[in-house]
Image (spheres, helix red, strand yellow):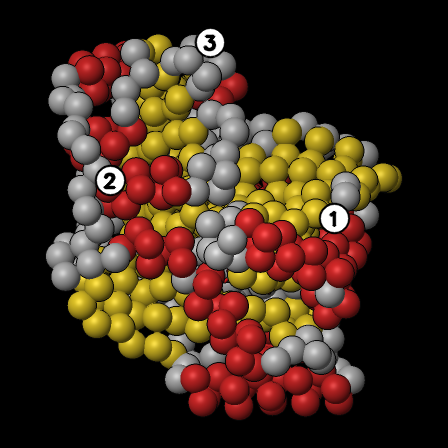
């Protein structure tokens, strides 16, 4: 029988009610809340729509192996099978928030301690910001008396209303030293070997990544880092997952993996990159060159085609929007929005399973790309480039691709970034592209 850890014990998931109570409150700054309440915690801030912070643990679901999302979905169905909830907006429903490793086989070893192959937490408390107000949700699995959850939400409400607003955003901690994997010379060899394999015919595209380990001059302040990302990357999905007192995985990603609400599904193809210009003219010139680049269009269309193909078993029609240039502070990408109306509502985890990894972070064909990545990269991707997000009892949810991200603990952080390699790739240009993609995390740290 499946079980879950809840407050340290292992309990049978069937026959247990999940009790959820909610209260509306005066909107309060997220930074003040993050300052006041430590781990375990999670932050989810989309460019549009409700954002939330969760902390504490009402239940943890984790699973391993290549069927981990199937196992996890079954556990979640049991957890959500009996919900005793009061009436409140959909965004305040109990949510499981978390993610999974890029590779099927994953050991949660440093720097990824606590990051299981797949791990989702139902927070004990969720604070949700909607357009003009905020809601507090308290969750408990099989409490002895549901009235204790009413008490919990009232007490937490008082605690939050007593939180003192914080001052200005602190300066970034600063970077004292950095260590790259691989070296520039080794990268050239890796890219050339990948190109040879592509020319040999059994691989079309592979995304190779690098890691950058940095020692910080001071301890990292997560509330400040998140606040800085909010200012610099409002159009990106900002996320943070901290399973315990140890490491935290966070980022500001431009890439939506999938969001599902009933039968409506939204996703995006994002691949093909160039830098930003120093002047408006140069910037527009770079954008025009990207839109016209055969190499980048090829790299991009492999992603768009794969996404459409992966969604087609679930949807009789998949709509492709216009290919445009997405401008981010340090880099610009080719982007194509893709939407689908499903034949029947599907659990968002089913769609995550179908889509991960898209060739924007993996490659094509998937197995050959996976093998090339495993044989080439000398560091552990962990949760980098993997689905990170949330889902609820209805199977609705939203997932981002965990790029433009870092895993950090104390005064150390490891940043990750990659680039799609196709037959026409140039190793030095791909190296430069990777450095630009470190931008969001480096800006937040130094
Ligand atoms: C792999 C990353 O980015 C991905 C690869 C891109 C590319 O190769 O052009 C562009 C956007 C992302 O889909 C990353 O940022 O680490």
Under 8 Å from ligand 1: the CB of mark 3? no
Image position of 69 (left or right of 115): right
The residue to which callout 3 is attached is 87
* Image quarter in which the C terminus is found: bottom left
Q: Residues within 10 Å of mark 1 (few under 14, many from 20)?
A: some
Q: Which residue is under mark 2?
A: 223
Residue at x-position 30% and y-position 11% = 26
- Residue 190 in the image: x percent, y percent? 54, 86
For marks 2 and 1, give the one nearer the viewer.
1
Q: Earlier in the sequence, mark 1 or mark 3?
A: 3
Q: Nearer the viewer, mark 1 or mark 3?
A: 1
Along the line of sight, the residue nearer the viewer: 122 or 148: 122
Q: In the displayed structure, would residue 240 be above or below residue 407?
A: above
The residue positioned 31% from the left and 11% from the top of the image is 25
Q: Which of 160 and 205 lies nearest the eye of the viewer?
A: 205
Measure how far apart labels 3 and 2 are at the Cα level.
31 Å
Task: Locate residue 76, reporting x and y percent.
Answer: 50, 38
Does residue 89 appear anywhere in the picture?
yes
Q: Earlier in the sequence, mark 2 or mark 1?
A: 2
Q: Quadrant of ligand 1?
A: bottom right
Tell me if residue 51 comes above or below residue 313 in the rendering: above
Left or right? Give the position of 177 relative to 226: left
Residue carrying label 1: 323
The residue carrying pointer 2 sits among few (fewer than 14), some (14 to 19) or many (20 or more) residues within 10 Å by Cα, namely some
Quick one: SS at disc 3?
Answer: loop
Q: Position of residue 372 (x, y in %)?
A: 59, 80
Mark 3 vs 2, N-terminal side? 3
Disc 3 packing (10 Å; few <14; some 14–19; many ≥20): few
């Amino acid at each position: 029988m499946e079980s879950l850890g809840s407050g340290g014990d292992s309990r049978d998931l069937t026959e247990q009610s999940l009790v959820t109570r909610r209260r509306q409150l005066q909107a309060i700054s997220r930074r003040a809340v993050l300052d006041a309440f430590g781990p375990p915690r999670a932050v989810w801030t989309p460019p549009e729509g409700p954002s939330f912070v969760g902390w504490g643990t009402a239940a943890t679901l984790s699973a391993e192996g290549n069927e981990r999302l199937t196992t996890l979905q079954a556990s979640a169905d049991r957890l959500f099978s009996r919900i005793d909830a009061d009436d409140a907006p959909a965004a305040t429903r109990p949510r499981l928030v978390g993610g999974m490793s890029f590779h099927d086989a994953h050991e949660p070893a440093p720097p990824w301690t606590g990051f299981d192959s797949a791990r989702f937490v139902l927070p004990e408390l969720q604070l949700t910001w909607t357009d003009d107000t905020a809601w507090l949700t308290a969750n408990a699995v099989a409490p002895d008396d549901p009235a204790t959850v009413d008490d919990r939400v009232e007490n937490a409400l008082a605690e939050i209303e007593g939180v003192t607003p914080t001052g200005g955003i602190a300066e970034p901690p600063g970077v004292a030293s950095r260590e790259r994997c691989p070296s520039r010379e080794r990268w050239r060899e890796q890219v050339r070997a990948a190109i040879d394999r592509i020319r040999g015919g059994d691989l079309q595209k592979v995304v190779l990544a690098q890691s950058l380990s940095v020692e910080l001059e001071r301890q990292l302040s997560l509330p400040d880092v998140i606040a800085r990302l909010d200012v610099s990357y409002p159009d990106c999905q900002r996320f943070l997952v901290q399973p315990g007192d140890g490491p935290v995985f966070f980022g500001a990603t431009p890439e939506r993996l999938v969001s599902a609400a009933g039968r409506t599904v939204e996703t995006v193809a994002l691949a093909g990159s160039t830098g930003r210009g120093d002047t408006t003219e140069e910037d527009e010139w770079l954008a025009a060159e990207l839109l016209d680049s055969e190499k980048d269009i090829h790299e991009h269309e492999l992603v768009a085609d794969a996404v459409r193909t992966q969604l087609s078993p679930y949807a009789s029609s998949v709509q492709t929007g216009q290919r445009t240039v997405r401008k981010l502070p340090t880099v610009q990408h080719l982007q194509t929005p893709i939407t689908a109306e499903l034949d029947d509502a599907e659990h968002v985890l089913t769609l995550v399973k179908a889509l991960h990894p898209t060739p924007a972070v993996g490659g094509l064909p998937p197995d050959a790309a996976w093998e090339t990545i495993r044989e080439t990269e000398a560091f552990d991707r962990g949760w980098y480039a993997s689905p990170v997000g949330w889902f609820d009892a209805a199977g609705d949810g939203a997932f981002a691709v965990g790029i433009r991200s870092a895993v950090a603990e104390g005064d150390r952080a490891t940043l990750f970034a990659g680039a799609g390699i196709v037959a026409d790739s140039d190793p030095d240009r791909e190296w430069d592209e990777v450095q630009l993609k470190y931008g969001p995390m480096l800006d937040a740290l130094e």
